[in-house]
Image: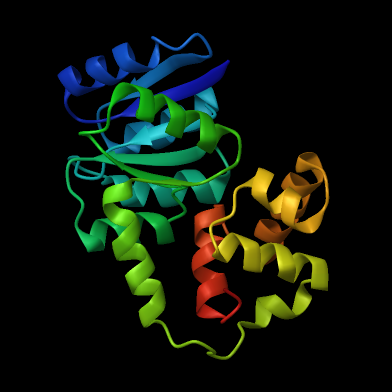
Amino acid sequence: MIRVLLADDHAAIRAGMRLMLEQATDVVVVGEAADGAIAVRQAAALRPDVVLMDIRMPGTDGITATREITTAGYADVLILTTFDLDEYLFGALRAGAAGFLLKSVEPAALVDAVRRVAAGDGFLAPEVTRRLLTAFVAIPAVPPAPPALTGLTQRERDVLAALGRGLSNAALAAELTITEATAKTHVSRVLSKLGCSSRVQAAILAREAGLA
């Protein structure tokens, strides 16, 4: 079962998300939080697979909570928000979120995103993907490589480049002619060496380093 924690300051929205998610036989909602601080405490106590995180909440906001949860390794975070502002999108991804969805998402797409994030992949709403790609294109093509990249093996640099192109674990395995389990292991090592909390964070770093 995929264990999910819901973080949103509106009880009605949490109830709606719970209803959508629990239509799936492989998803269970293990807890709810009405603000970011509670979400961090709940994530630490419950260790869900995925936290569905709103951004605008009283007290500790969703981006701050995402950074704390992913840095501590409590869970993967999937942002689910009404607002698709660039500052929220980029802020959430740099904080370590593994995905970004809008609350207008259809139930089947929400469940699919939760499954993909729980499986170790990233997920971006189609509405924001083009803006993210445009921002990547605007980054200088070959900036100086961050010092952390020097500790990667050639295979790990290949993996990082693949992450920068948005490849899933399955696609990465096919490209490198390895098993999907081996691909997941390589991704985990790359994230650990780079100090990244998510594959999306690593993808941003790969683009900034001119690898993708």
User: Could you say which quadrant of the image residue 167 lies in?
Assistant: bottom right
| Vertical arrangement, residue 192 with respect to residue 97, above or below | below
Across and down, in percent, residue 139 comes to 41, 82
Say if residue 175 shows up in the picture.
yes
User: Could you say which quadrant of the image residue 86 lies in?
Assistant: bottom left
Across and down, in percent, residue 152 comes to 77, 72
Q: Quadrant of the N terminus?
A: top right
Q: Which residue is nearer to you in this view: 148 or 35? A: 148
Q: Which residue is nearer to you in this view: 59 or 148? A: 148
Taking the spot 52% from the left edge, 74% from the top edge, the residue there is 207
Report the label total.
0
Taking the spot 74% from the left edge, 50% from the top edge, the residue there is 174
Taking the spot 44% from the left edge, 40% from the top edge, the residue there is 77
Across and down, in percent, residue 148 comes to 67, 76
Say if residue 153 shows up in the picture.
no
Q: Which residue is nearer to you in this view: 170 or 33? A: 170
Taking the spot 57% from the left edge, 73% from the top edge, the residue there is 212
- Visual colour scheme: rainbow
Residue 188 in the figure: left or right of residue 93: right
| Vertical arrangement, residue 188 with respect to residue 180, above or below | below
Across and down, in percent, residue 66 comes to 40, 47
User: Could you say which quadrant of the image residue 138 lies in?
Assistant: bottom left
